[in-house]
Amino acid sequence: MNFQRPLTAASLFCSSGIGDIALHAAGAKALVANEIISERAALFMHNFPFAKTFVGDIWKLEKDIVKEVRHRLAGKELDILFATPPCQGMSKNGRGKLLNAIRKGQKPKLDPRNQLVIPTINIAVALQPRVLVMENVTEMENTVIAKNGTEDFVYILDYIRERLGESYKGSWGKVEFADYGVPQRRQRLITVFSRDPFALKYMSVFKTVLPPRTHSQNPKNGFAPWMTVREVIGNLPPLDAGKKETSANDDIPFHRVPFLDEDKYYWVSNTPPEKGAFDNQCVNPRCLYQENVTHGASRGTDGINRSHHNTPLYCEKCGELIPRPWVRKGNELRLMKGYTSAYKRMNWDLPASTLTRNLSYACSDNKLHPSQNRVLSLYEAMLLHTITDFEYEWKRSDGGRVSDKLIRESVGESIPPRGMKIIFDHILQLLNHDSKVYEKHKNIPTQLELF
């Protein structure tokens, strides 16, 4: 049996629509969407004008969303509900540690953003999609919420399973997007629940509904090697953040970088490949001592990882100032507080580090260009995030300005669409009851745990 009709979808917390690029490219059309931040919603609406987009608080809009989806379905069933609730409040505590604390009566500190899974599942229960796909940080599996506004704490994944009921079966797993050919290290938790009989049968056999990975850091058994920074941005025209005329390329939209002030430029310009500015050595031409103690961090008795405070800022041999990040306090300089990943260059021959909303700040983790004196340009970020694989315009439906900040946040808070399309391609193949999926993936390794 094969479904010939286009597959239908609804998208919650759609942000600027970066994840929905993959959903649409795979062959599912979002009929309805929701986003609370208006300027991000305006980007989504420009790129997906066929969707009815509700802008505002999902707690207040969930009934309207359900009503509109039902109206647009006109009696048909919803194929996919795609939800990416905010991740900033997810717990980094281990699941066992958190559970033991709850049992001892120690109440966890709850972030209200984590509670947004409740209206998400309210909508899922009302619409009964054939498949629910959720994407979030890996810490989601260790995060608890309070059910019904009470002190009845439950893990998010257990809550989803309980609310959806026995007709749904679910699987979840940590996905490294570099393993799907994305030139960026980005780990996310992909959670899938389905009631579709074909998907359930597949899940019972393979314990997963995710496709096998295609790439590997150590390629063998048919895997391709990870995509590297060099492969993607190595041939772009160079930029330099030291002066205006070298900080942008007018022939390539978004290929521009912010200026670095004199101090920061000094630190960055003396940072070798694959190194961080905190580990820079003496540049006094009469000394050039290269054995100054390098920066580091260690965990205290409280288990918290803190950077060291005794890293030298002045050469231990000649006493000259080392080009390491400093702060000025009157006429004195002291080493800036920070970890070794700050002011650090990316590696040409590895995928990029995770692109965050701070990707244009030199102090952000591993965000310096591999060899040039600058951070990544916005265009390079779009390439490494694989947005440029698809048709997407940085334009707003309301005609408003698309700031660099809006672009950074849209990239930093989204998932690489190239990898997500591979996942959606596989899920849609299951929903289309394509028996070839068994032949193609008969050797799939178990990547997820089956609930």
Image (tube, helix red, strand yellow):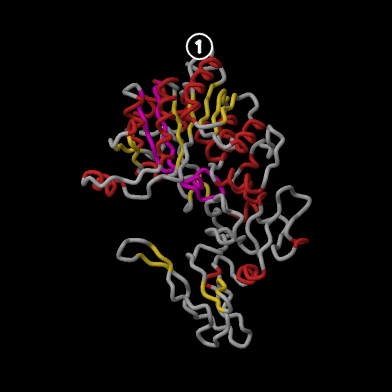
Question: Which residue is at a point 41% across and 43% down the rendered structure image?
Answer: 174
Q: Can residue 38 be seen in this snapshot?
A: yes
Query: In which quadrant of the rendered view does residue 144 lie?
Result: top left
Question: Which residue is at a point 50% across and 18% down the rendered structure image?
Answer: 67
Residue 305: x %, y % from top left: 38, 62
Question: Which residue is at a point 46% across and 47% down the rendered structure image?
Answer: 187
The one of 284 and 88 positioned closer to us in this rendering:
88
Q: Is residue 406 above or below residue 443?
A: below
The one of 294 and 397 positioned closer to us in this rendering:
397
Q: Can residue 226 be seen in this snapshot?
A: no
Residue occupied by mark 1: 75
Magenta-drawn stretch contains 169: yes
Residue 381: x %, y % from top left: 62, 50
- Magenta range: 168-196
The one of 216 and 122 positioned closer to us in this rendering:
122
Q: Residues within 10 Å of mark 1 (few under 14, many from 20)?
A: few
Q: Quadrant of the C terminus?
A: top left
What's the residue type where badge 1 is placed? Gly
Q: Is residue 122 above or below residue 295?
A: above
Question: Which residue is at a point 57% across and 37% down the rendered structure image?
Answer: 37
Magenta-drawn stretch contains 419: no
Secondary element type, mark 1? loop
Question: From the viewer's perspective, is 441 left or right of 100?
Answer: right
Residue 61: x %, y % from top left: 50, 26
Q: Is residue 71 above or below residue 250?
A: above
Residue 290: x %, y % from top left: 53, 80
Q: Residue furthest top?
A: 75
